[in-house]
Amino acid sequence: MYLKCNQRIKDGKEHRYWSIMENRRCAGGRVVQRPVLYLGEINDSQREAWIRSIEVFDEDHCRQDKLALFASDRPIPAAAADGIGVRLSEFVLKRPRQWGACWLFNQLWEELGLREFWRGKLATSREGTDWEHVLAASTAYRLIDPGSEWHMHRHWYANSAMGDLLGEDDALAAKDTLYRCLDLLLPHKRALFDHLTQRWRDLFGVKFEVLLYDLTSTYFESNPPFPKNDKRRFGYSRDKRSDCVQIVIALIVTPEGFPLAYEVLPGNTADKSTLREFLQKIADQYGKAERIWVMDRGIPTEEVLAQMRASDPPIAYLVGTPKGHLTKLEAELATKPWQQVRDGIDVKLCPQAGELYVFAQSRDRIGKERSMRRRALRKLLKRLAQLRAMPKLTRDELLLKLGAAKNEAGRAYRLVDIHIPEPRQAITPETFHFAIDRAKLREVRRREGRYLLRSNLCGDAPEKLWELYMQLCHVEEAFKDLKGDLSLRPIYHQREERIEAHIFVAFLAYCVQVTLRHRLRLHAPGLTPRAVLEKFATIQMLDAWFPTTDERWLIFARYTAPEKDHRLLLTQLNLELPQQRPPRITAKGAILIGLRLLKGCGKLLCALINPRADQTDLLGRERLDAGPVVQRRHPAFRIPGQVRDGFDEDAVGAVAGGHNFALLRAFEDAFQRVHLEPGLVAVAAVAFHTGDFKQRFHVRGVGHAGLGRGGRQRDGCLRFLGGHGGGQGEGGGERRDRELD
């Protein structure tokens, strides 16, 4: 492997983008280059660190221990007392699922101490639901492949290895369980951020002295009216969706991106009305300390800034100012000299009554804003000329087209004086003409790439103030991650408390993501959390089923061997993959038979086989005569709602005989191939008479809609006959106990 540089000229500047490459030899002696990792733009010291890592990594050869199995066509050695014969040629691979990204999430979850934190906050339910595991799975889903809770319930959880890593079955992702978990989270928001700030101090030595504060909004495509005190309201939309109701999210982060607090506010909240409350919130939660608040213009008011200066101790601030302040100070600033704080950045200082105004200009920003303005103005003038040349254009049509042109041109529209025809006048070059306003254009040119900052840190160097203000991009990056990478919207919930809980889970996923980003910044610069998660997601887990000579199955749950890029990332991040899980073997006497649905008639054909004559139900509670039904709502019998490999789509059930409660494990193994709706339990126990094969059993749907005439299938999940409180089974709802002979 080696580093490769790609050069690109952008905006007159040369950019160098680095990648880790490897050579692969193909047929005919041809060598092709394969990118292993894309690092982006990295500095020289980071480049040297990667080169050293590659050199060390190439010298390290991984070893894998192989499991010795006794082939069925050879005798088992006498020394192997517990040996079994395995028919190696008949093995089956099942359930490929994503493992690597889930494992990486669990490592970060443990590193942040969130497992212990939530176990102390969320007690296990009476039904045996581990709410900490439910929250961990929901947060991992939000981080790795965000979507709705319904999508997690129906698709993502079954195709991931979160259940294997947490030691849970598919009941963990039942949709009602996911929704109920949201109802338990909000009371612990403050305690969570107290815990996380302490963990970030211990792990990375983060200092919470500089606080970046900003607000954003997210909209709902739903129709009002809502309850009287609902936070979904119309207001100023930062997403350009003024036609939708919205909520406002206020966020405080550090320059490294670590969040300290957030708040969900009504959608019509004004930015300037939020700062006072947050100052008090941070003081109450983290105590009074010397902190610097960095904010954009429009958030602080003169009254709040005076309060910050008069507080004990004084609260330092650095804020952007509206352009009206620049107009007032323009004459005084014109007499001040420019001071260079770094290459391409110049400032002017203007002290004013206990405050310091910093007038900054960036040459790169001047060029960028000037280019954008010229492009928009050129496009607007071209469009106006087209409108003037259009034949048979009425005045009303002209006004509509001018409105569209104004919306597209933005601020460039006010730089053009446009004369519109009077009512009932024809559109001619004399009645409809336009020209550039030179006075406004000169004023805009003077202010392009320049902005005015305001602070009460009068003794600090101007370059420090400029650098602090530039860090506001980190809070914008946090909003971008929440809305884009973590898919904060669309929000499908209707109840306000669950909307806030949905945002809470998104912020919890963001906390895990920013922890991974900081580790990458320290150990693998140039990589992004999304790139690393996608790389680890290629490590899959699958089940290898080997039949044995004594009619059992030897099951190996294995994750795939990591490739070179995975091992390089593990080395850089100081992580080590866990040992492969030990294999398991099915119990003797538990034989799986599928229940096939005869399409078109809604009948079930079942076959039950068990050699034992002495029968009890699977819970070991009562003796059974020939053919009674066993039905229990019990945590051990929660069956996932997806049909697995090994049977046709219309296989809807599985039956196994049992002797006592110890057989539950074998019965659980049998159910891995055929799964029912969560909570739907249908267990039949069979008794055998001597020398006679007889069976009678019932199938009953518990709490789910019935299967109508002709059968009904929805997204691969089939429902049983005669559901309680649902649809009617064949022959009407009265025959809920369907006897099949």
Image (tube, rainbow, N blue to C red):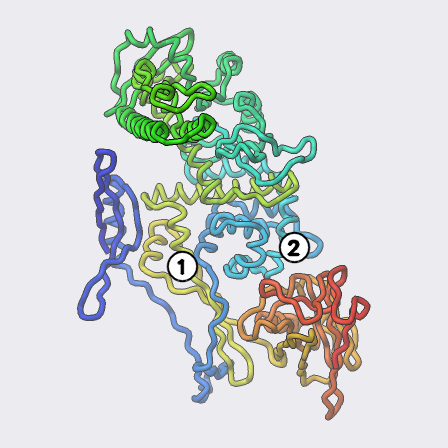
Residue 252: percent from the left, percent from the top? 49, 30
Question: In the figure, is residue 663 to the left or right of 71?
Answer: right
For the C terminus, the quadrant is bottom right
- Residue 629: x, y in percent? 76, 74
The residue carrying mark 2 is: 129
What is the tally of numbered marks visible in this picture? 2
What's the residue type where badge 1 is placed? Thr
Q: Is residue 121 visible?
A: no
Residue 81 against residue 236 in the figure, above or below: below
- Outermost residue to the right: 734
Look at discs 2 and 1 and give the one toward the viewer: 1
Which residue is depicted at the point 34% across and 22% down?
A: 429
Q: Amino acid at mark 2?
A: Thr
Q: In the displayed structure, does residue 9 sit left or right of residue 651?
A: left
Identify whether 110 is placed above or below 72: above
Q: Residues within 10 Å of mark 2 (few under 14, many from 20)?
A: some
Q: Nearer the viewer, residue 21 or 104?
A: 21
Task: Please say if the residues under marks 2 and 1 sit with CB atoms less than 8 Å apart.
Answer: no
Q: Which residue is mark 1?
A: 538
600 relative to 108 in the view: left or right: right
For the residue pair 92 and 299, the one nearer the viewer reads as: 299
| x 74%, y 86%: residue | 694
Badge 1 element: loop
Q: Position of residue 580 (x, y in %)?
A: 45, 65
Q: Is residue 325 above or below residue 297?
A: above
Is residue 248 shown left or right of residue 75? right
Q: CA distance from mark 2 to mark 1?
A: 30 Å
Tell me what residue is drawn at x 61 percent, y 71 percent.
671
